[in-house]
Amino acid sequence: MNYCPCPLRAFLFIASLFTSTTAFADDHDKLDEVVVTATALHESSLEVAQPTSVLSGDALVRDRGTSVGEALANTPGISATYFGPQASRPVIRGQTGERVQVSEDGAESLDVAALSADHAVTIDPLLADRVEVLRGPATLLYGNGAAGGLVNVLVHRVPDRAYQNRLEGAAEIRGNSALGERAAAARIDGGIEGWSFHGDAYARDTDDVEIADYALSRAARGSGDFTPEEIADSRGRIANSSSRLRGGAVGVSRVGEAGFAGFAVSRFETAYGIPGPEEGVSIDMGQTRLDFNSDWHAGNEWIDAAHLRASFNRYEHAELEPGGEVGTQFDQDGLSVRLAVETAELAGWRGSWGLQFRHVDFAALGEEAFVPASETRNVGVFGYEERAFGPLTVEVGARLESQRVTATDELPEYDSARGSFAGGLVWKFATGWSTALNATSTTRHPTSTELYADGPHVAVQRFEIGDAALRPERATTLDFSLRHRADEWSMSLTAYRSDYTDYIYTSLTGEVEDDLPVAVYLQDDAEFTGFEAEVELPQIGVAGGKLSTRLVADVVRAELDAGGDLPQIPPLRVGAEVRYSRNAWSAGVSANRFSSQTRVAGNELPTDGYTMLGADASWRIPSASGREWFAYLRGENLLDEDARRHTSPLKEFVPLPGRSVGAGLRLEF
């Protein structure tokens, strides 16, 4: 923990490059509709081979949820783990944890959420302008932690545009009956004479979650492990599932014709209970973070643009016993730096080349610490090029990444370097129509938890044992997409297959240690196959308004080559939404059917199917002063289903919330 990011010195140096106080072209709102900033050259979803999703606008306001995972849970190809309202990580194509990176404005969260499903992500969707998802391997651009996909939450805490002596912002309040949620958020952005400023604050409190039936599943109630009193007490609510969240940030940047440079300081604090059989366990978490962002629009014969992202954080996290004493204390300092340079067109080729550095100093203290202290360093270099040949665009890329993990207790050091490669074709064969073929060969290094875990992990109710001899896993992924976008209707159909060599996973052995089932980290060859579909049907004029219909479906199968299924894989989902809009009014009804999951791993229980029915109504009301109000009313799980996600390690103890009504009011100015 002896390194210094020197953010102020870097800021002053780069800010000095932007001496002009004239803002560069501000087309922010228009670009937000089409550009995916997490892609190599900041292109639209139709222009890149890799499947992408974007959640923004009124849909994001209605669907924010209480975590990044819940905000995205209804997106094709994505589910969530659900450890209660605060701790719910995204699951992309059956992958989560250490394979799905969650970032804010292109910089990773640098928390310990990937360490365990009970750890919250330190990025909250309350302030998000937009959420971008790269489905499938994003290792080429973002490294080891994005081997299964990337979620990028755009907040713009470091202002990236000039405001020309004006202020704008938003304030929002929201609530949900099943969660007892009370939430509020506000942000303000402004600028003067080439300097731009940002400030935000947010808070959320929730009570124990109300549910349709018992917190304990039928299998748990019939296991004989719980008394009749314990079973009765679990009815109607999830004990120890309340939460408290506070956060905020300030940012400043220098903006000119050549781009911008600035930094932001933010603080994130949350405290929440861990529901499940171990009563009274809770987490008290905090993170202080410093971000530096800079974009330079060179526009010369060699360089088109350069993007620098650097983040430094101090993270602390205490797992508290029922009496309030600390069972395990996690501390982590992290530094992440990423430089990407977009090259000018040369012989028809455009590209992005870059360097990435990551250093994490992690410590876990206490009698129940199941992982040792460790330092992890990643260094990566990557390159991406694309060229259009008429209607056909060719994409190629490569990345070389080294990782070194040094642990205490005289454990063996991990030190390895591996390459990843990608190629893609996008064919625009007719107006509004395109096909995309994306092929990747990616490597993921094992994490310190997978290498060195050895102890009781009470929050997920298992005794975890790692393997210091684990090798890097390699995945060869092929996905094919058919896409259409027009004024009348749109669709995206994708089929994919990933073949893994030395896939790392946990397996329940059937043994018991410290009164917990033993789970070991193993490696075997595996295969993931699946599809994702989303169709927006042509709108129909009805009663002076428009009626639109959206259809979605997805499924993934994950099997070991030696036989058997992998654990916690989401089942088949099919859904539909019908929405009526007229002027400032909008109302919709949605239904999603989740099939039962009977393809389970050894010592894993199947999960019953369920249907989630929802409805909402919203109003967007402009005023003469330039302010705009947005209000919504939303009903969720209207059938009051006993719904359990197969992707949750605590599905036998923690169902989804029961029937609920949510409401929110947002002011934009």
Image (cartoon, grey):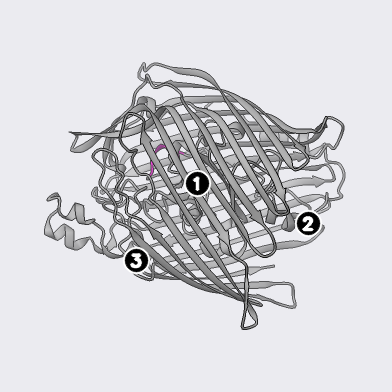
Mark 1 sits on what residue?
122
Q: Which corner quadrant holds the C terminus? A: bottom right
Does residue 585 appear in the picture of this structure?
A: no
Q: Residues within 10 Å of mark 3 (few under 14, many from 20)?
A: many
Answer few, some or many: residues within 10 Å of disc 1's Cα (few below 14, many 20 plus, some between 14 and 19): many
The CA span between labels 2 and 1 is 28 Å
**Which residue position is annotated with label 3?**
658
Circle 1 — which element? loop
Q: Which residues are magenta?
A: 112-117
Label 3 or label 2, whichever comes before in sequence order: 2
Question: How far across and how far down the image is residue 74, in percent?
Answer: 48, 57
Residue 635: quarter of image = bottom left
Question: Is residue 113 within the magenta segment?
Answer: yes
Residue 303 forms part of the magenta stretch: no
Q: Is residue 26 above or below residue 235?
A: above
Q: Residue 324, image x and y in percent?
A: 29, 47
The residue mark sitting in front, 3 or 1, is 3
Residue of label 2: 163
Residue 399 in picture, x, y percent from top left? 61, 26
> Which residue is at the front of the view, 601 or 128?
601
Name the element at disc 3: loop
